[in-house]
Image (spheres, grey):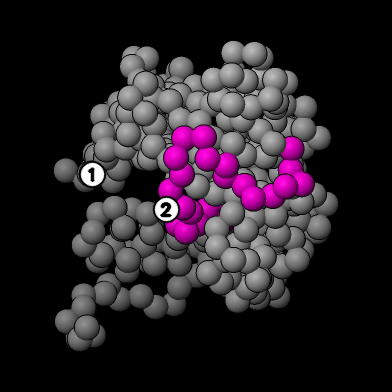
Amino acid sequence: MDPSQVKIPPTKDLTVDNITENVLRTNAVCEDERTKYVLERLVSHLHDFARETRLSSREWMAGLQFLTEVGKICSEVRQEFILLSDILGLSILVDSIDHPKPPGSTEGTVLGPFHSHEADDMAHGDCLSRDVQGEPLLVVCSVTDTRGRPVEGVKVDIWETDSTGHYDVQYAGRCGPDGRGVMRSDSAGVFWFKAITPVPYPIPHDGPVGRLLRLLRRHPYRPGHMHFMFEREGFDHLITALYLRNDPYETSDAVFGVKDSLVVDIGRAGPEYAKKYQVPEDHALLTYDFVLVSDAETSALRERNSKVAMDHLGRKVKMVNGLPVPDLD
Ligand SMILES: [Fe+2]
């Protein structure tokens, strides 16, 4: 880009009190309305954060050093920025804003840093886990839309830890995926598989995020859970998880992901289930009925929520591609 062709408003002699408006004026040359708005709010809040805390240079340098360390520890299998977003409650907040759910539908929760695209396709009844130490668990689920109609052909991605609380990607010498798989719902909207009963585990805490948790006197544990991701054209992408009731960390999840509607009891297979799914009687059993929301329902709800939130802030906005930008007309 030729600097002489860029029209930047003149800025000079900036002070604590006028720096923000001048940076915003400079960024306002940006042609994309949504990028401009997001950057405007980001800069405004960052500047207010510095002014409100009377941030010292030493503290800001420590913050930058921390973010540098977060970046340096990231790899293909270690996503420290996702962890940071998770423990600050930002991941669950963004999910709640972007994937609003009407009553009766399945709520979403944090993706976490351990989803992988390596999972093998599974047939109904296959076992997700090779871990023989885990407690075998039969999982029988259904998928319907918000009107209760079964949804066929939904791609369901499932992942869980082994019985020691580690995901496959956390093992350096692993051979292929384990504790994860992909399957599709049948014509009745059903999918079922064998797995192991989830156990609580600490998120990786040997890096900068772990140090931050210790500084805040927080523990790194998540209650036992199994992750699910649902994809089917016409439906809002659902990332969720099922959590075990009465887990010691049910109400103190390090990443704030637990919602009551996603907390489940592990039952026991009666004679009917045992026969139908070929497991011994009294086998551990998890059942759940997932309800997906259509793209159209989600868009309408997201837009409605945006308008209410913007009205509340006293902002005049218009919607562009389903997202608010200032309405300057
Ligand atoms: Fe997890």
Q: Position of residue 240 (x, y in %)?
A: 52, 37
Q: Quadrant of residue 135?
A: top right
What residue is rendered at 70% in x and 55% in y?
A: 166
- Name the amino acid, label 1: Asn
| Residue 150 visible in this rendered orientation of the protein | yes
For the C terminus, the quadrant is: top left
- From the viewer's perspective, is 16 left or right of 61? left
For the N terminus, the quadrant is: bottom left
> Mark 2 vs mark 1: which is more N-terminal?
2
What residue is rendered at 64% in x and 27% in y?
A: 279
What residue is rendered at 37% in x and 14% in y?
A: 148
Q: Is residue 42 above or below residue 140?
A: below
What residue is rendered at 32% in x and 28% in y?
A: 152
Which label sits on residue 41?
Answer: 2
- From the viewer's perspective, is 290 left or right of 63? left
Q: Is residue 248 above or below residue 14?
A: above
**235 is within the stretch colored magenta:** no
> Which residue does the numbered mark 1 point to in the structure image?
321
Q: Nearer the viewer, residue 310 or 276?
A: 276
Q: Position of residue 288 (x, y in %)?
A: 54, 23
**117 is within the stretch colored magenta:** yes
- Name the amino acid, label 2: Arg
Find numbered disc 2 in the image and state the secondary structure of the residue it sits on: helix
Q: Nearer the viewer, residue 22 or 231?
A: 231
Q: Nearer the viewer, mark 2 or mark 1?
A: 1
Q: Position of residue 177 (x, y in %)?
A: 55, 58
